[in-house]
Image (cartoon, helix red, strand yellow):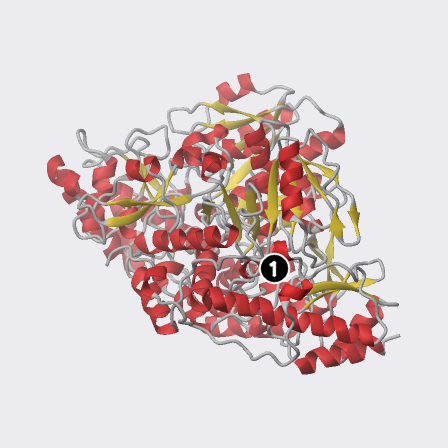
């Protein structure tokens, strides 16, 4: 018998008899061609043995060291309470709330997540459906085409995370380049046939961009402005909605999700209410039950693949509910002041580090550009610097491949770690 | 109070979490950032303490059913038990704490896990080339169809404009075809609910790019002509894509490659028990033939002697995700598959046994449009005069999560029941008992159900007409 299946041989015999067949093989009489022989997989392990192998594989990774990598995923504090809530079986083992009467827990969480995202982005409606930051960006690019009724083609600069740009292209959206100078995008010459103009702030190099200029440029050519923002940064930065952006998207990983080698995370996506019908994915709305009691339900379902099929506005079927729950609990625990403090701690530590690197004679790539907690520093040999850092039990920053290292600093980094980073990098040649 | 929000349980100044103290000089953001970039108004988020947070979300969880609390036979969703060892694996610090951009030599354990899962899925499908990057089943579909598109671009075969989907297809299939810039057209069914092969033969030509087939299909019936269907497509140079949503019926019994499938996706959150989590995150790995391998998303994991490396397939469609896909789900699936090995065949056997048992027990009281061997799920119709919706809500009062209803679209008042292998005969008997009782219950009484759930039926029209999607 398989693991986790309750049947005894007597159960199986009784059930086969009720069905009216003699053997389990008979249940597959209609299968053709059949697989003969056993699956060539390693023999089944007990739970204890399997988890021991997990531990052994984990030891083959470099973990538990201070991390200076960012570029779309950040080594932030994850409050313990999040794990406690996420492990509630009612949340962990449920599915898309098709039956709202027995799914009020998740539905309300999604409603609260949407609310948090709306508050941070300054836009009225959002969803909890996009898979990660890159997927949010790609879906936003497609959304601009539907709303402007233009071919999907968006203007981006080097300031957009190159991984996001690649996913946009994979999704069949055309990309045109905007000039990028001194660490910031020049929005003065946006082509007039694009459906969307993207502005990432903080951008890939950690620099605060002019979202308002991007919005004005987009609207000047009757295109839409999509702002790509780190949700923690939005605790201290003006909301994209207030700066004229039509759509705000991003990666919610910094809101209480572990790094976990890249996922699962959650994307977020917000827009104006007037654009809600072009928003992909599930949307949760407030309503009442038969007795007039407040309750939540998936709504505007007519946009979705299971109803509209080939005419749906996306094939998305997911509700990124469990990681959205992590973000919701994180936002509740931290509150507006806690989020601000995370941002300020990270920024102070990053500016301290940048200053110390400067004192050691190293130059920032964009010395005059305003940044929060991520910056590019020029080094004679980035690879060698990262090797030296690892020898000193530090995971260095991202090698940008052109003589600079992209360094991210979070609230977790201590002065001791920052000083050690400077000392190693300054002496790495 | 029902529906009370976390924000309304707080008070300005309360905090639920403390952070490390600042140990360097403070940077005043007002001095280093342009004034207009700074936020003027504080976001209206909850200001609450940790005890309140824990109680709020714990109580919310109690208004939610999961597999842990109730039988959950949601068709096409494979709501099987989620072994807790999977969860233990995903929180091991050596995995949870690694950054996706750490160099290959710093992530050998993670890359080994991925390489092994690639091998497991290749064995299970018979299709040798795997990508674990798609983050959901629908994204696995999209990845597959984009790869097919890229293949035709590569061979200069520009006239391929259509993707065929059966009438029984999941909505994601035609939506995916549209997203990949193909025209989705439908093929009808034969008397078994399977793809009508002769109709298909008439439809295909040099403009056909692919057929998206789900096998077993969404009526729970095995596509007995799948090999012939593959031949029909291959004769015109088109591909057969298999939606692997229903793989829980197939393991150790059929292999996609033997059936002529060129490319398929897996739902690791269904078949390999990574939790559904309220609708996601999932994981939609794909596997394909050598012919399509070069088009896989960037990157895939390769083994070079003793080292694992990341590589971009030669003619890759590009990235479909920022990093390596939902690694946490891949790790959980690795653990699950290792706890089963070749016994995955028993998983499918028991899943099919359970579905057929329910079919046999419900026959008579419920109409069964395709009353023959089913695979891991069975579609039934309520007795005349009764609605699937009412039976579903009635089931809630009996403590059972309803099956999928009104899908597949080809069956009127469809109730698609997928028990999965992890349910006992006693649970199935209780469920059947409730279904039989509901078949006899007066329609007027059913219309009141549920009466024992956290809410009564909801006003769904109001939610759409007076949209309120935030606090």
User: B138 or A328: which is nearer to us?
Assistant: A328
Say if residue B463 shows up in the picture.
Answer: yes
- Residue B330 vertical position relative to residue B210 in the rendered view, above or below: below
Q: Is residue A334 found left or right of A387 in the rendered image?
A: left
Percent x, y of residue A67: 67, 71
Q: Is residue A251 found left or right of A391 in the rendered image?
A: left
Percent x, y of residue A20: 28, 43
Q: Does dot 1 land on a helix, a strand or a loop?
A: helix
Residue pictured at 47% horizontal, 71% vertical: A47
Say if residue B127 shows up in the picture.
Answer: no
Residue A205 occupies quadrant = bottom right
User: Where does label 1 land, which residue?
Assistant: A262
User: B381 or B140: which is nearer to us?
Assistant: B140
Residue pictured at 63% horizontal, 21% vertical: B207
Q: Residue furthest bottom?
A: A416
Label 1: how many residues lie within 10 Å, few (<14), some (14-19) or many (20+)?
Answer: many
Quadrant where the N terminus of chain B sits is: bottom left
User: A25 or B360: which is nearer to us?
Assistant: B360
């Amino acid at each position: 018998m398989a693991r986790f299946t309750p049947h005894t041989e007597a159960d199986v015999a009784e059930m086969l008899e009720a069905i009216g067949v003699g053997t389990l093989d008979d249940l597959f009489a209609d299968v053709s061609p059949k697989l003969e022989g056993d699956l060539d997989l390693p023999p089944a392990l007990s739970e204890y043995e399997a988890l021991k192998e997990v531990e052994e594989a984990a030891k083959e990774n470099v973990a538990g060291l201070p991390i200076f990598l960012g570029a779309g995923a950040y080594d932030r504090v994850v409050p313990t309470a999040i794990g406690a809530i996420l492990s509630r079986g009612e949340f962990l083992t449920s599915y898309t709330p098709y039956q709202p009467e027995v799914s009020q827990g998740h539905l309300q969480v999604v409603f609260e997540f949407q609310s948090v995202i709306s508050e941070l982005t300054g836009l009225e409606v959002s969803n909890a459906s996009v898979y990660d930051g890159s997927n949010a960006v790609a879906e936003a690019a497609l959304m601009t085409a539907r709303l402007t009724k233009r071919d999907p083609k968006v203007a981006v600069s080097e300031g957009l995370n190159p991984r996001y740009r690649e996913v946009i292209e994979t999704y069949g959206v055309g990309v045109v380049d905007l000039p990028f100078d001194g660490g910031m995008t020049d929005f003065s010459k946006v082509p007039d046939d694009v459906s969307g103009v993207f502005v990432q702030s903080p951008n890939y190099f950690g620099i605060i961009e002019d979202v308002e200029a991007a919005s004005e440029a987009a609207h000047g050519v009757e295109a839409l402005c999509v702002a790509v923002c780190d949700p923690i940064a939005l605790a201290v930065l003006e909301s994209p909605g207030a700066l004229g952006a039509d759509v705000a998207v991003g990666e919610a990983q910094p809101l209480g999700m572990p790094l976990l080698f890249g996922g699962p995370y959650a994307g977020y996506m917000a827009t104006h209410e007037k654009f809600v019908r072009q928003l992909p994915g599930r949307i949760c709305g407030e309503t009442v039950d038969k007795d007039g009691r407040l309750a939540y339900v998936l709504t505007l379902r007519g946009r979705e693949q299971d109803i509209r099929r080939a005419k749906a506005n996306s094939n998305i079927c997911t509700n990124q509910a469990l990681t959205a729950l992590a973000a919701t609990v994180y936002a509740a625990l931290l509150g507006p002041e806690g989020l601000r403090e995370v941002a300020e701690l990270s920024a102070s530590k990053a500016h301290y580090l940048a200053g110390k690197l400067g004192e050691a004679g190293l130059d920032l790539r964009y010395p005059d550009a305003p940044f929060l907690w991520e910056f590019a520093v020029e080094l004679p040999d980035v690879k060698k610097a990262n090797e030296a850092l690892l020898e000193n039990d530090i995971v260095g920053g991202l090698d940008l491949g052109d003589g600079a290292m992209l360094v991210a600093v979070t609230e977790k980094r201590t002065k001791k770690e920052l000083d050690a980073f400077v000392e190693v990098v300054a002496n790495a040649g | 109070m029902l529906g009370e929000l976390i924000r309304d349980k707080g008070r300005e100044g309360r905090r639920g979490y403390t952070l490390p103290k600042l140990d360097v000089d403070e940077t005043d953001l007002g001095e280093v950032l342009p004034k207009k970039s700074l936020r003027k108004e504080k976001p209206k988020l909850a200001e609450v303490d940790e005890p309140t947070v824990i109680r709020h979300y714990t109580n919310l969880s109690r208004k939610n059913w999961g597999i842990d609390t109730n039988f959950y036979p949601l068709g096409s969703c494979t709501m099987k038990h989620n072994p807790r060892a999977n969860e233990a694996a995903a929180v091991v610090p050596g995995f949870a704490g690694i950054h996706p951009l750490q160099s290959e030599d710093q992530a050998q354990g993670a890359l080994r896990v991925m390489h092994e899962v690639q091998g497991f899925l290749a064995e299970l499908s018979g299709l040798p080339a795997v990508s674990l990057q798609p983050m959901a089943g629908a994204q696995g579909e999209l990845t597959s169809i984009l790869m097919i598109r890229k293949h035709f671009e590569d061979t200069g075969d520009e006239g391929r404009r259509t993707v065929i989907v059966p009438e029984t297809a999941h909505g994601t299939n035609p939506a995916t075809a549209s997203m990949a810039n193909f025209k989705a057209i439908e093929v009808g069914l034969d008397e078994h609910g399977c793809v009508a092969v002769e109709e298909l033969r008439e439809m295909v030509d040099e403009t056909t790019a692919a057929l998206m087939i789900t096998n077993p299909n969404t009526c729970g019936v095995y596509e007995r002509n799948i090999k012939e269907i593959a031949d029909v497509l291959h004769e015109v140079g088109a591909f057969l894509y298999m939606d692997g949503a229903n793989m829980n019926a197939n393991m150790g019994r059929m292999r996609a490659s033997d059936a002529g499938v060129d490319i398929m996706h897996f739902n690791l959150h269904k078949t390999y028990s990574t939790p559904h989590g309220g609708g996601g995150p999932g994981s939609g790995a794909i596997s394909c033939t050598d012919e399509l391998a070069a088009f896989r998303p960037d990157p895939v994991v390769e083994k070079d002697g003793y080292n694992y490396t990341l590589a971009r397939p030669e003619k890759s469609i590009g990235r479909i995700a920022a990093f390596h896909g939902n690694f946490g789900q891949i790790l959980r699936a690795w653990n699950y598959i290792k706890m089963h090995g070749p016994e995955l065949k028993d998983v499918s056997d028991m899943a099919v046994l359970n579905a057929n048992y329910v079919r046999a027990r419900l026959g008579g009281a419920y109409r069964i449009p395709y009353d023959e061997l089913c695979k891991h799920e069975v579609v039934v119709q309520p007795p005349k005069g009764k609605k699937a919706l009412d039976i579903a809500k009635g089931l809630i009062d009996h403590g059972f999560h309803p099956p999928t209803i009104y899908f597949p679209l080809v069956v009127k008042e469809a109730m698609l029941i997928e028990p999965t292998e992890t349910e006992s005969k006693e649970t199935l008997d209780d469920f059947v008992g409730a279904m039989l009782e509901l078949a006899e219950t007066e329609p007027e009484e059913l219309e009141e159900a549920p009466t024992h759930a956290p809410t009564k039926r909801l006003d769904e029209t109001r939610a759409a007409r007076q949209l309120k999607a935030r606090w």
